[in-house]
Image: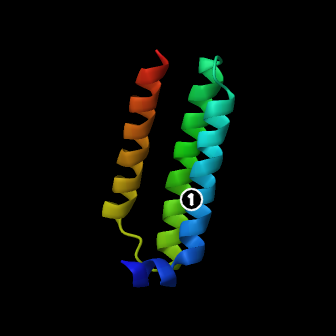
Amino acid sequence: MITRIKNHFFPYLILFSLLSLGAIAFLLSVGNKNLQFKIVFFTSFIYVVWGMVYHSLDKTLYLKIVVEYIVIAILAMVILGGFLL
């Protein structure tokens, strides 16, 4: 695991940064549920796009991986969207 992180440090750093920015934007928009949901949607979309870009560059992009990223993004939107109700 440590070797994988060392070998793929930059892509993980980009993913961490994108998700952190989404979380910060979500927290800064407390009180505006519509904006928060848009932030969750956009962050989920970016998560899926980055996953496809990363796996495409790594030559490991398969349908199973794309579906996994989409399912995780939808799950995050459903869970966080449920909190916003």
Rendered residue at 55%/36% (across/down): 41
Please give left or right for residue 60 compared with residue 16 in the image: left
Q: Residue beneath label 1, please?
A: 16
Q: Residue furthest front?
A: 2
Which residue corresponds to the image point at 47% horizontal and 71% vertical from the top-left?
55
Examine the rendered structure and indicate whether residue 12 appears above or below residue 34: below
**Mark 1 closeness class: few <14, some 14–19, many ≥20 residues within 10 Å:** few
Q: Is residue 79 above or below residue 44?
A: above
Residue drawn at point x = 51 percent, y = 78 percent: 8
Q: Quadrant of residue 17?
A: bottom right
- The amino acid type, in three-letter code, at marker 1 is Phe
Residue at the location (59% across, 67% down)? 13
- Residue 77 in percent (x, y) is at 45, 34
Q: From the viewer's perspective, is 21 left or right of 44? A: right
Percent of width and height locating residue 81: 46, 25
Q: Secondary structure at mark 1?
A: helix
* Along the line of sight, the residue nearer the viewer: 37 or 30: 30
Colour scheme in the image?
Answer: rainbow
Q: Quadrant of the N terminus?
A: bottom left
Which percent across, then down, holds residue 27?
A: 62, 32
User: Total label count?
Assistant: 1
